[in-house]
């Protein structure tokens, strides 16, 4: 799965990659509005016209689970990754089937399964709202910036989309608060599962192969967009090209890369290195062990924990890589050189008028280190407890919905409420034993971090142990019933106040503290950070121009590059794997065992067909499911991971080593035909 991992050799090219604000060849999480078409023309001889960009943007999909996709048929068919639909596959599996383990293929649209909580969005337009947002926070005390900005964001979003439930407007912060843009999305709230392969096919090699290459994963899935009970007509879809990619072929990856910190200061990175990442690593490591042990207690528990375990293993590997990057002396020296060069130029140009945003951010980093443990323990909540999440959403929605949109917590603004409602009201399977594990773990870690005598710990636990409290909360709660959740949602504050559900009562008990910690963090960290980063952004624009791309924000971006392998320490890794390699790699033992369908199809599959491939595109988490396009804007693959060298992608990009890993449409077409017999799906893709 796309994320970040590390090896120490990765940083050997860091000094080149971190030359002060210079964008290296093929680097960039470019917005569609600022895509460097001339640079691409010079590098690859490809004309990326406004019409090309409009076509790709109109068929690029943002999924509410933090993944990307693309529309590939005139009937709302969306191409993405299998690992993006694991929760859906689990949720829609009947008692006598396991679609996550065994795969799923709908023979016809009536058999397609609606994915609980899943939404899809397609960008319709972008408007600059920088002046409006900056005016809203101008002259504000740092402690008031977040509240004022949230109010202005809510107003802009409401004006942009009104009460049209088919639209979602979102203000995106770009260039660390240097620019603000209003993105208008067309929203589809009925998204159904069409196809996903078995876990053995999609995740062949498991955690050992994650962030590595060669890879042999059919990490693909198909979804369909519905509206009013019917498949959506999508005439602006992308063309499916089943031909294999060629070495050095120019390729483009539209998607929604997640938050990156390539413009963060050394002080900000120090907080990540010294506090946030180590705390996260310790928790993920222990949680991984608990989930493994849980899954060993029977097939039902293994099935219930499978998705969470895969995500925890992925996240842990990401944290390990991030820490290695942020601790490497070569990386830090290069980052220091970059920051010193920028400081010298900015002070020479602006003098005392700039202030000292670097010193301010250093002070904020100290505040952040002090506040983070309590904020993480209480304000963030458990890693993944569906019952707790539902309770907190219901309690907060009841308190926030009566307020004017601009005065609410931003996640409950009018623009967000339809997605919030879908997430809490859609039916979803809830395993009580897994819920208890997640709550026990969270409560025990909170007590460990804060101390048994801390007032926050005492309000969390009362007189109970983490184990007793978790057991009582899960056993007594009725929130697993969608009808109960709907009654509480519809009943609002009076229903919440009258509820005797122990999970609702628990959230009522702790929510004032959680809100206070959040408000304190916003006043002392988020607000001052926004002001300081905005000052730095304006200095960057003045000194280096606006030819740079902004950090990732889970919003629409486009990267360019080529199909390419890499050479590290004298060893060259080619860009392709084949079906023949898959069968050679198969040992019959997990995680290198094949399912029966793939064993039976070995003689039918073309052994030399390209399976997975690598490109030098700049991608990070959030790009999972992003289509890989050729120069004609045809789909030739889907990105699903990065190589081990891309581990520090949140912090920098190395064009010599960082590689995206994708599964080819050639392999997908071959497998759909010869392994799965998906003739109707192939016909819809235009493949005969």
Image (cartoon, grey):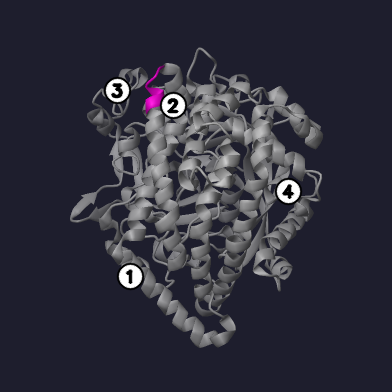
Reading the image, the residue beneath label 2 is 197
Reading the image, the residue beneath label 3 is 602
Nearer-N-terminus badge (3/2):
2
Give the residues drawn in magenta, as a range: 293-298
User: Mark 1, mark 2: which one is toward the viewer?
Assistant: 1
Q: Are marks 1 and 4 in contact (CB under 8 Å)?
A: no
For the N terminus, give its image quadrant.
top left
Q: Callout 3: few (<14), some (14-19), or many (20+) C-alpha neighbours within 10 Å?
A: some
Q: Is residue 686 visible?
A: no
Nearer-N-terminus badge (1/2):
2
Kind of element beneath mark 3: loop
- 297 in the magenta segment: yes
Nearer-N-terminus badge (2/4):
2
Nearer-N-terminus badge (3/4):
4
Q: Are marks 1 and 2 in contact (CB under 8 Å)?
A: no
Q: Which numbered tag is attached to residue 333?
A: 1
- Residue 502 or 158: which is nearer the viewer? 502
Reading the image, the residue beneath label 4 is 413
Relative to residue 645, is residue 229 depicted above or below?
above
């Amino acid at each position: 799965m796309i994320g970040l991992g590390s090896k120490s050799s990765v940083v050997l090219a860091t000094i080149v990659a971190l030359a002060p604000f210079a964008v290296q060849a093929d680097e960039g999480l470019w917005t569609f509005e600022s895509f460097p078409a001339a640079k691409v023309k010079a590098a690859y001889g490809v004309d990326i016209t406004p019409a090309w960009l409009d076509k790709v943007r109109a068929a690029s999909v943002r999924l509410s689970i933090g993944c990307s996709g693309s529309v590939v048929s005139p009937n709302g068919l969306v191409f993405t990754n299998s690992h993006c639909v694991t929760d859906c596959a689990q949720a829609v599996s009947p008692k006598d089937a396991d679609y996550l383990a065994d795969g799923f293929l709908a023979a016809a649209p009536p058999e397609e399964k609606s994915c609980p909580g899943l939404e899809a969005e397609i960008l319709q337009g972008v408007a600059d709202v920088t002046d409006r947002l900056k005016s809203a926070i101008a002259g504000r005390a740092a402690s008031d910036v977040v509240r004022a900005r949230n109010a202005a964001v809510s107003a802009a979003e409401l004006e942009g989309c009104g009460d049209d439930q088919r639209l979602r407007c979102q203000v995106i912060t770009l260039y660390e608060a240097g620019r603000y843009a209003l993105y208008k999305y067309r929203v589809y709230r009925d998204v159904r599962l069409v196809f996903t392969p078995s876990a053995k096919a999609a995740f062949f090699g498991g955690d050992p192969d994650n962030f590595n290459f060669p890879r042999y994963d059919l990490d693909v899935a198909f979804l369909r967009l519905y509206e009013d009970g019917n498949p959506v007509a999508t005439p602006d879809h992308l063309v499916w090209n089943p031909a294999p990619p060629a070495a050095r072929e120019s390729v483009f990856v539209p998607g929604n890369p997640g938050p990156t910190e390539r413009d963060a200061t050394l002080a900000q990175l120090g907080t990540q290195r010294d506090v946030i990442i180590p705390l996260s690593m310790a928790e993920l490591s222990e949680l991984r062990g608990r989930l493994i042990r849980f899954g060993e207690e029977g097939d039902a528990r293994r099935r219930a924990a499978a998705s969470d375990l895969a995500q925890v293993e992925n996240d842990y590997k990401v944290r390990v890589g991030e820490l290695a990057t942020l601790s490497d002396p070569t990386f830090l020296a290069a980052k220091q050189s970059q920051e010193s060069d920028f400081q010298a130029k900015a002070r020479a140009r602006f003098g005392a008028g700039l202030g000292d945003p670097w010193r301010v951010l250093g002070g904020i980093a100290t505040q952040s280190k002090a506040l983070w443990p309590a904020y993480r323990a209480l304000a963030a909540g458990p890693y993944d407890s569906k019952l707790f999440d539902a309770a907190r959403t219901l309690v907060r929605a009841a308190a926030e919905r009566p307020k004017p949109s601009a005065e609410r917590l931003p996640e409950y603004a009018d623009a967000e409420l339809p997605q919030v409602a879908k997430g809490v009201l859609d039916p979803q399977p809830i395993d009580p034993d897994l819920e208890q594990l997640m709550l026990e773990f969270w409560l025990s870690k909170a007590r460990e971090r804060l101390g048994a005598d801390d007032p926050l710990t005492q309000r969390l636990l009362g007189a109970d142990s983490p184990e007793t409290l978790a057991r009582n909360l899960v056993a007594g709660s009725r929130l697993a019933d969608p009808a109960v959740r709907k009654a509480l949602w519809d009943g609002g504050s009076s229903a919440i106040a009258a509820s005797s559900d122990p999970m609702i009562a628990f959230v009522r008990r702790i929510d004032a503290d959680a809100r206070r910690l959040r408000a304190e963090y916003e006043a002392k960290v988020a607000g001052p950070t926004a002001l300081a980063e905005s000052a730095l952004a304006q200095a960057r624009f003045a000194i280096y121009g606006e030819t740079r791309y902004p950090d990732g924000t889970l919003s629409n971006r486009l990267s360019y590059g080529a199909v390419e392998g890499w050479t590290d320490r004298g060893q060259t890794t080619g860009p392709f794997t084949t079906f023949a390699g898959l069968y050679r790699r198969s040992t019959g033992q997990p995680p290198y065992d094949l399912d029966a369908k793939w064993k039976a199809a070995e003689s039918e599959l073309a052994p030399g067909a390209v399976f997975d491939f690598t490109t030098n595109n700049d991608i990070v988490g959030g790009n999972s499911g992003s289509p890989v396009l050729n120069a004609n804007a045809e789909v030739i693959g889907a990105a699903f991971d990065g190589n081990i060298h891309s581990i520090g992608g949140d912090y920098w990009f190395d064009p010599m080593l960082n590689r995206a890993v994708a599964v080819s449409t050639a392999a997908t077409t071959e497998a759909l035909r010869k392994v799965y017999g998906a003739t109707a799906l192939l016909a819809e893709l235009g493949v005969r």
